[in-house]
Image: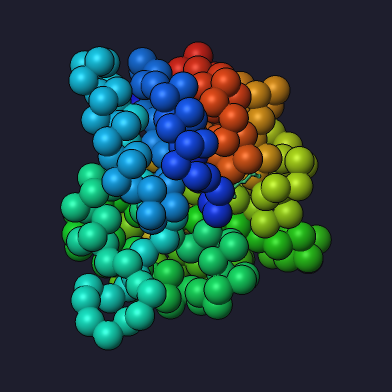
Amino acid sequence: MSKRLVVGNWKLNGSLAANEALLGAIGPVAGVEVVVCVPFPYLAQAANAVATCSAHEAAAGIRLGAQSVSEYAAGAYTGEVSVAMLAEFGCRYVIVGHSERRALFGEDDATVGRKVQAVLQAGLTPIVCVGEALVEREAGQVMAVIGRQLDAVLALTGAEGLGRAVIAYEPVWAIGSGRAASTGEVGEVHAGIRRWLAAHGVPAGQRLLYGGSVKVDNAAALFALPDVDGGLIGGAALVAKDFVAICRAAVANGG
Ligand code: 13P
């Protein structure tokens, strides 16, 4: 099994002072790959902090990620940030298709596919977010929605490309709600995603993360599920002791 992966998505939070305290307190956790996805203006600050950590901990440092990226490489696209720019700051991962991007910033499935393709072509790893809204769950459409979201990526990347991505199952209703999906719900959807990937010829062994109200008290149970390889953490990633505890829960469960 590949190493467990725990990703902090800071969303629109942070300040130079707050970041310094947070980054200084989280440090690497042996046996788990820890990633922080910070707002663009703080990439340089975070890159410096991560380099400092790595110098102290030869084993496994914290890795850096971004929360979104442009589908375009360069040109007249005011306000956009390219994947090459992210790479220059040491980003290894880019979250693509987060439900907040889809719902609030008009990113459709095809746009998500093009962004994933741009990230892969630059040699970075996309963290592709998929997941259903509550009405879609209640209508029994969970795998139909996720299949549609994945199909749009697969159409551009092919099976081999999609296989190089990390997939994060984030049910929209669980994000920031304090109501994580149950272990039964997560287990069922992750198994469904694995079946979907296999049926579409995607190489086995892909890392599947769960995200949505992961907290210190539910992380261990979620990470113990056979098809869960780690987590995508929002609010709890802003509290150093909670984030570290969640990372440790991932190690304790098979890292
Ligand atoms: P919360 O952990 O705050 O629910 O956020 C999850 C998320 O959206 C991570 O990308």
Q: How many marks?
A: 0
| Residue 247 seen in the current view | no
Q: Position of residue 235 (x, y in %)?
A: 63, 40
Above or below, 27 against 194 in this view is above
Which quadrant of the rendered structure holds the C terminus? top left
Q: Position of residue 243 (x, y in %)?
A: 54, 27
In front here: 140 or 91? 91
- Identity of the residue drawn at 54% across and 66% down: 101
Task: Tell me residue 55's x, y (percent).
Answer: 21, 20
Q: Quadrant of residue 80?
A: bottom left
What residue is rendered at 42% in x and 45% in y? 37
Q: Is 107 on the left-hand or right-hand side of 58?
A: right
In what quadrant of the picture does the N terminus appear? top left
* Above or below, comparing residue 148 to residue 160 in the picture: below
- Identify the residue at horizontal 51%, vertical 22% (top origin): 244
Residue most extreme to the bottom: 76
Placement of 176 over or under 134, stated as above or below: above
Name the residue at 32% across, 32% down.
49
Is 240 in front, or is 219?
240
Q: Is residue 224 above or below residue 167?
A: above
Q: Seen in the image, is 154 located left or right of residue 219?
A: left
Is residue 200 shown to the viewer in this render? yes
Relative to 55, 140 lies left or right: right
Rendered image coloring scheme: rainbow
102 vs 44, nearest the viewer: 44
On the image, the x and y values in percent for residue 251 come to 46, 18
In the image as oriented, which residue stretches furthest toward the front? 17
Q: Is residue 207 left or right of residue 243?
A: left
